[in-house]
């Protein structure tokens, strides 16, 4: 694969960047993100958190041609342990699933379990079509992903319609039509939650959209924003850390092209025998810095990889370690070892690309059609080498892979985004946008209050949807506070809803 192909598809979550799968996606400087929904290692006690159900979903909500009569099985997870029931019109909390296996999100959205008892809430987690086990064409992934004709039903608009359909059907089954619904989501799931509230106000009374980069589109957010935030994260630890990383790319390239250089690099970074090229190495290193920034959580975590608290601080500590002298490779090795080998059980790092370019996963399709989110620009200051996003290359890739031309203006046409403060000032309500400024995606987030009830909660120390994680005893005060604010806002939505319902009954 040409390097530029790989620059285009950074996923919102890059779900599967676990040591077992990162090796599939080398790139020149950045990870591509290829979703293999079955890959993530899920914790063994998952069946304690929810029950799994399937719902017969309509393939095409918007057309009445013969194809659209088709259905598929959509998976959803449910936890009714805390639900107060229909009599008390207790709320339903819905997670609007992202680009991946829904179990992954259900296990990383502890906030919903933590607050369910307080709200007596029913919890459901809805899987996004074409991901996990919610595969159209009889669950035949190969067929569903075969060509653009079959993939055409994979879109955010169809997914939102799935969610509305399922929620209303479930409420009907439970004869609890008056239970208020709040939608939750992180990252792309957060974008879906926010858009769901705007499109389906009769289905959801509010949305908690965490780290939802709904503004990460061309002519709204700069293509340099993403990497500038990563740069800032490293600079904030130490100027030296930033400089060492920034200076390392040229050193790697020079070494890679010198005699015996590849072998030196291979040894320096403990890479397995199948090591391929300098650019793979750069992509692999970058991945650790990008994902490390996204998951720079204040407590130990296991989201994209098992990590200590504040991984960026730990990486910079390794880089600033005086015992490594001026040995850049040694410093970098110890830094990325924190990301890729925190558990200490990786024998050697496998950078070999064995992925099948014709089975690129759903996010690639979405990026080739509607989710065109420029994040690959690097200016002079960037911790990565200078580069520009190339829409032409992206488009060319999409033509070659799927015979489609991306529609970069579609999302903002369908959901808005331009001049959002003015547009939403008198339209829409009850949305919380949480963003942590350590998170590179926060550059495309809503960082200002748009109205009295479209609220931005912004935390300087926060990372990618950190608020949605299970609470721990070690959580810093700002994190405890932000969750309290979210709870209070949602409480207000619900009591207002009940008040209005009571008023309309009399
Ligand atoms: C719901 O989640 C709680 C943990 O918060 C768990 O104890 C309970 O068993 C779960 N209920 C179901 C029905 O899975
Ligand atoms: C509602 O009940 C019908 C009939 O049992 C069932 O087929 C359907 O899947 C249920 N809906 C949901 C969302 O579970
Ligand atoms: C690193 O330090 C050693 C001595 O400590 C020196 O010989 C070598 O030239 C230095 N290398 C670089 C790249 O500065
Ligand atoms: C992973 O960590 C362990 C324990 O620190 C170490 O022995 C091993 O060499 C590391 N693996 C690699 C590939 O560096
Ligand atoms: C961005 O603005 C330029 C100039 O107005 C326009 O040609 C282009 O289509 C816009 N792109 C998007 C995605 O809106
Ligand atoms: C938005 O308003 C809320 C109070 O309603 C406040 O807590 C929050 O800090 C404000 N957000 C920003 C970004 O100013």
Image (spheres, helix red, strand yellow):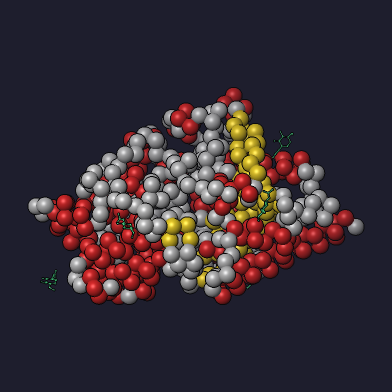
Q: Point out the residue furthest to the top here.
A: 66
Image vertical order of residue 147 relative to residue 255, above or below: above
Coordinates of residue 237 in the picture (x, y in percent): 36, 74
Tell me which corner region of the image, top left, top right, bottom left or bottom right, holds residue 126: top right
Residue found at x 27% / y 61%: 333
Q: Nearer the viewer, residue 23 or 11?
A: 23
Residue 197 position, x and y percent, is: 64, 54
Q: Is residue 226 visible?
A: no
Q: Specify the quadrant that holds the N terminus.
A: top left
Q: Is residue 439 left or right of residue 73?
A: left
Residue 251: % across, % down = 18, 61
Which quadrant of the structure image shows residue 222?
Answer: bottom left
- Nearest the viewer among 333 and 183 is 333
- Residue at 56% x, 52% y is 107
Judge whether 24 appears above or below 343 on screen.
Answer: above
Whether residue 282 sits left or right of residue 39 in the image: it is: left
The quarter in which the C terminus is drawn is bottom right
- Which residue is outermost to the right? 506
Q: Does residue 403 lie above or below 334 as drawn?
A: above
Residue drawn 41% across and 51% down?
18
Residue 53 visible: yes
Q: Is residue 318 left or right of residue 115?
A: left
Find residue 52 and report its horizontal and vertical position in percent. Answer: 63, 41
Residue at 25% in and 56% down: 269
- Compared with 245, 389 (above or below) is above
């Amino acid at each position: 694969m040409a390097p530029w192909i790989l620059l285009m598809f950074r996923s919102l979550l890059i779900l599967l960047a676990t040591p077992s799968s990162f090796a599939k996606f080398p790139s020149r400087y950045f990870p591509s993100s290829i979703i293999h929904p079955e890959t993530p290692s899920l914790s063994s006690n998952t069946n304690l958190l929810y029950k799994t159900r399937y719902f017969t979903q309509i393939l095409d909500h918007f057309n009445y041609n013969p194809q659209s009569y088709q259905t598929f099985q959509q998976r959803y997870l449910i936890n009714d342990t805390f639900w107060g029931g229909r009599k008390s019109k207790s709320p339903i909390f819905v997670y609007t699933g992202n680009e991946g296996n829904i179990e992954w999100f259900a296990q990383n959205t502890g906030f919903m379990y933590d607050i369910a008892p307080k709200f007596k809430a029913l919890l459901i987690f809805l899987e996004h079509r074409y991901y996990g086990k919610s595969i159209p064409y009889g669950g035949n992934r190969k067929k569903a992903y075969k060509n653009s004709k079959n993939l055409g039903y994979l879109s955010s608009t169809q997914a939102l319609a799935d969610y509305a359909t399922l929620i209303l059907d479930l409420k009907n089954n439970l004869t609890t039509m008056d239970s208020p619904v709040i939608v939750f989501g992180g990252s792309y799931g957060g974008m879906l939650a926010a858009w769901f509230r705007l499109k389906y106000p009769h289905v959801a009374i509010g949305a908690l959209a965490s780290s939802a980069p709904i503004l990460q589109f061309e002519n709204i957010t700069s293509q340099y924003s993403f990497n500038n935030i990563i740069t800032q994260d490293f600079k904030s630890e130490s100027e030296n850390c930033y400089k060492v990383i920034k200076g390392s790319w040229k050193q790697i390239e020079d070494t890679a092209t010198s005699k015996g250089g590849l072998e030196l690099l291979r040894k320096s970074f403990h890479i397995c025998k199948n090591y391929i090229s300098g650019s793979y190495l750069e992509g692999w290193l970058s991945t650790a810095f990008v994902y490390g920034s996204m998951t720079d959580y204040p407590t130990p975590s296991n989201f994209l990889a098992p990590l200590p608290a504040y991984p960026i601080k730990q990486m910079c500590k390794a880089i600033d370690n005086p015992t490594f002298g001026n040995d850049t490779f040694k410093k970098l090795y110890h830094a990325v070892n924190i990301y890729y080998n925190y558990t200490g059980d990786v024998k050697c790092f496998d950078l070999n690309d064995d992925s099948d370019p014709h089975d690129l996963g759903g996010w690639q399709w979405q990026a080739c059609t509607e989710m065109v989110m420029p994040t690959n620009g690097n200016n002079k200051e960037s911790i990565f080498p200078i580069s520009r996003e190339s829409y032409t290359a992206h488009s060319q890739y999409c033509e070659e892979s799927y015979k489609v031309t991306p529609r970069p203006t579609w999302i903002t046409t369908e959901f808005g985004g331009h001049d959002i403060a003015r547009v939403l000032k008198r339209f829409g309500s009850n949305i919380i946008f949480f963003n942590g400024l350590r998170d590179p995606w926060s550059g495309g987030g809503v960082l200002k209050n748009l109205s009295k009830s479209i609220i931005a909660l912004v935390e300087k120390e926060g990372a990618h949807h950190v608020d949605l994680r299970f609470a721990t005893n070690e959580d810093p005060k700002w994190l405890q506070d932000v969750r309290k604010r979210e709870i209070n806002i949602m409480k207000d939505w619900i009591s207002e809803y009940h008040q209005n319902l009571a008023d309309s009954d009399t």
